[in-house]
Amino acid sequence: MASRKEPSSNEAASESSPDERVYAAISSALLHGKLAPGAQLVERELAAAFDCTRGTIRKVLARLGAEGKLTLEANRGAFVPSPTPADIREVYRARQVVEAGIVAALCGTLSTQAKRALRAHVKAEQRAVKAGSVADCVRLAGHFHLLLAELAGAREVQAFLAQLVAKTELYKALFDPTKLSNCASDEHGRLVDALEEGALDIALTAMRTHLDELEERVLAQASATRTNDLATLFAGA
């Protein structure tokens, strides 16, 4: 029996509800760095750009705000987050501290099942890179770190790290978008090697270097400029 053909992105968008169509378009714009940090998303302009009601726009902006992808300010509206370099460094510093502890807890103690899970995840990252999927690369890269926290068995640490990872994923989207390389999966693979071998010094260095490089790539692009013209940006969406 022939397999069912997956709908194209255009077909999927045409079949989705107005809410989902607008949500997907704005999320994609954020993910690909098309919206400048600090840009205001004006309901009236978005409704005209998407040819939909302001009520639809309002619901989508509220959803994106709840997910931390937008900053919602009472009596002012919705804005693209605009973290300062100091904000970015602070969050990455917190990740360094938390994830060093996770590495120390896991080093040399991974079960066979845990090793398989980590290796499978790294392979999924490599497939996403090969496919050129920015969204999957960002999602999988962040989830690798959450998987380590899960394997360490510390739920409160896992919840805190999830907040930090969400912030750094946003920084990546704002300041280092669309850049695809296999560095994350390669770095993750080397880290797994060190954890399996019980090489704590190597594992800690691998994690520290990995996070340092992520931080520096984001900071290097933090001054880049992008358009705030919503009508142009979302034309045809």
Image (cartoon, rainbow, N blue to C red):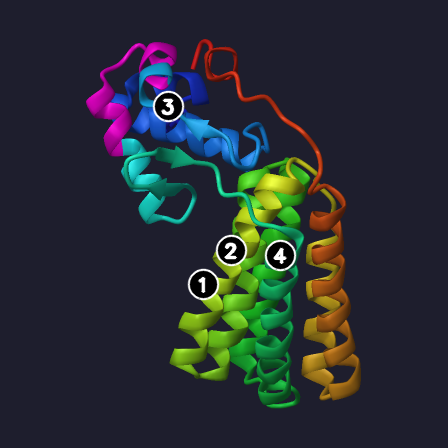
Q: Which mark is residue 42?
A: 3
Q: Earlier in the sequence, mark 2 or mark 3?
A: 3
Instruction: Look at label 1 and name its amino acid.
Output: Gln
* Image quadrant occupied by the C terminus: top left
Callout 4: 10 Å neighbours few (<14), some, many (20+)?
some
Q: Earlier in the sequence, mark 3 or mark 1?
A: 3
Q: Secondary structure at mark 4?
A: helix
Query: How far is mark 2 from mark 3, CA to CA?
Result: 23 Å
Confirm whether the magenta stretch covers residue 1.
no
Query: How far is mark 4 from mark 1, CA to CA?
Result: 13 Å
For residue 88, say whether it is visible.
Answer: yes
114 and 36: which is toward the camera:
36
In the picture of the structure, the residue carrying the numbered disc 2 is 167
Q: Secondary structure at mark 2?
A: helix
Query: How far is mark 3 from mark 1, CA to CA?
Result: 27 Å
Query: How far is mark 4 from mark 3, CA to CA?
Result: 26 Å
Callout 1: 10 Å neighbours few (<14), some, many (20+)?
few
Q: What segment carries the magenta color?
A: 46-59
Q: Which mark is residue 163?
A: 1
Query: How far is mark 2 from mark 4, CA to CA?
Result: 9 Å
Q: Which mark is residue 88?
A: 4
* Image quadrant occupied by the N terminus: top left
Placement of 51 over or under 18, stated as above or below: above
145 and 15: which is toward the camera:
145
Residue lying at the far front of the rendered structure:
75
Please say if the residues under marks 2 and 1 sit with CB atoms less than 8 Å apart.
yes
Residue 64 at what x, y percent from top left?
35, 40
Q: Secondary structure at mark 3?
A: loop
Placement of 121 over or under 65, stated as above or below: below
The residue shown at (44%, 83%) is 153
* Main secondary structure along the magenta-highlighted residues: helix
- Between circles 4 and 1, the one closer to the viewer is 4
